[in-house]
Amino acid sequence: MENTEAPPGGREAEGPGTGSGGSPDERRLLVVVHAAFLLLLGSSFARFLTRDQGGSRTAWVAGLFAVFALLYGLGHLLAPPPRAGTPPGARHLAWLASVSAVWAALLALAPSATWCAMPLLFAGLYALPPRIAVPLAGVLTALVVVCEVRAAEGPLNPNMVVAPIAVAAVATAVFVHLQRQGARQRALIDDLVRTRRDLAATERRAGVLAERQRLSAEIHDTLAQGLSSQRMLLQAAQRVWPTDPETARAHVREAADVTARSLAEARRFVHDLAPADLAGRSLPAALAALAERESGPGLTVGFHLVGDLPVPLPERTDAALLRIAQGALANVREHAAATRAALTLTCLDEQISLDVADNGRGFDPAPALPATTVASPTAAPGRTRGHGLPAMRIRARQSGGTLTVESAPGEGTVVTAAIPLAPAEAARADTAYGPTPEPAA
């Protein structure tokens, strides 16, 4: 997933005056502020030359104007304002103090420099915390009012007192509001970034757990069953080899076939494909092949199809039902001591169900067991083993269905997986899988 988050304190957090690293809007604002300062400075100096100049002080005032302009330019190059939400550095505070002192000296000699207070007001309000910026704005405003009153000619104009205070109050209120709003936004953004990071970590953990669960189910239903079958066939071959070599060779050949199927399953499992039995086959054909393959000495497995599949099922549903059948037959072969088992695939209008029944010893499914274990009829009381039934339940649930187990000691076991069909699938009754295979003997 592409990372679109801005690091805390990154460019999105920078404010006006942070140089070329700010956003285009911030750079444009900076240009406007600098242009306003130069315009106010030039008009103040022009007014001084035309109205306020007098004698020897003209050179001093011109020098102070030059120093004021130089300090302002160097300050934004060498001591830029801090990023939004961070305290100002010592260099910026020193610049702000020096440029304010030069401006105050200018006021004493040239009252026309009063309106240059606006850029200073902007710099102070932006860089300083409100508890310092508000008193500074008050001091600057008072100096402006005093100079305006001192330079007034004739009766006192109330606007000379009220206008600077009103302008400074509005500017201060707006800046403080923007600062507080910016602080709240930064807090929300930080909280959002943390939440997204925590959510991503949670999703990764959930994905890891789901993948582990899938891997355990796949290994149980494919490789583990194949290895178990190979072991039993090779043990049977070892027992009869001295007395019946031909039967032993048949067991070895069958074990080799199981090995080939397990290898095919492992390769498809690595590539996350459908079960090998479903390659080029419909689900009924795959179940019929499974029943025929599991039939052997001591156990006969039959397959029955009830109804017609109305539509091709999703690959995930086909794979889930086939894996459930494999897991149930593995339990029959290992635990049930059954002689007959039956796979029944029932196709209804709104759901498809698979029944795996056997005539084995059965067991009591009533005791509550941990979700990751399944009772073994051959295990000692109080002990649990295996992943068969939990894996089957998970597969059914992932396909939107349910799995039920009906059993009792001495009465066999019936495992039923029922998966509903989507309305769009149930409506397309004219689509079929193809020829229905004959039930296995």
Image (cartoon, helix red, strand yellow):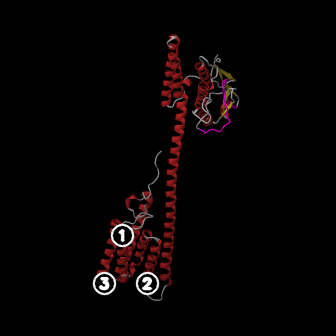
Q: Nearer the viewer, mark 3 or mark 1?
A: 1
Residue 134 located left or right of residue 356: left
Q: Residue drawn 55% across and 29% down?
A: 221
| 103 over 126 or under it: above or below | below
- In contact (CB < 8 Å): disc 1 and disc 2: no
| Amino acid tagged 3 | Arg
Q: Which residues are magenta?
A: 350-371
Q: Residue drawn 52% across and 29% down?
A: 273
The residue that disc 1 covers is: 90
Q: Nearer the viewer, mark 1 or mark 2?
A: 1
Residue 365 located left or right of residue 34: right
Q: Is residue 366 magenta?
A: yes
The residue that disc 2 covers is: 146
- The CA distance from mark 3 to mark 1 is 33 Å
Q: Secondary structure at mark 3?
A: helix
Q: Earlier in the sequence, mark 1 or mark 2?
A: 1
Q: Nearer the viewer, residue 307 or 252?
A: 252
The residue that disc 3 covers is: 57
Q: Nearer the viewer, residue 335 or 421?
A: 335
Query: Label 1: how many residues lie within 10 Å, few (<14), some (14-19) or many (20+)?
Result: few
Q: Please, which residue is most extreme toward the front here? A: 380
| Amino acid tagged 2 | Val
Q: Is residue 253 magenta?
A: no
Residue 404's spot in the image, x, y percent?
Answer: 67, 33
Residue 407's spot in the image, x, y percent?
Answer: 68, 30
Tell me which secondary structure the magenta stretch mostly adopts.
Answer: loop
Q: Quadrant of the C terminus?
A: top right
**Which quadrant would residue 431 be assigned to in this image?**
top right
Residue 372 showing in the rendered view: yes
| 425 over 238 or under it: above or below | below
| Amino acid tagged 1 | Ala
Q: Secondary structure at mark 1?
A: helix
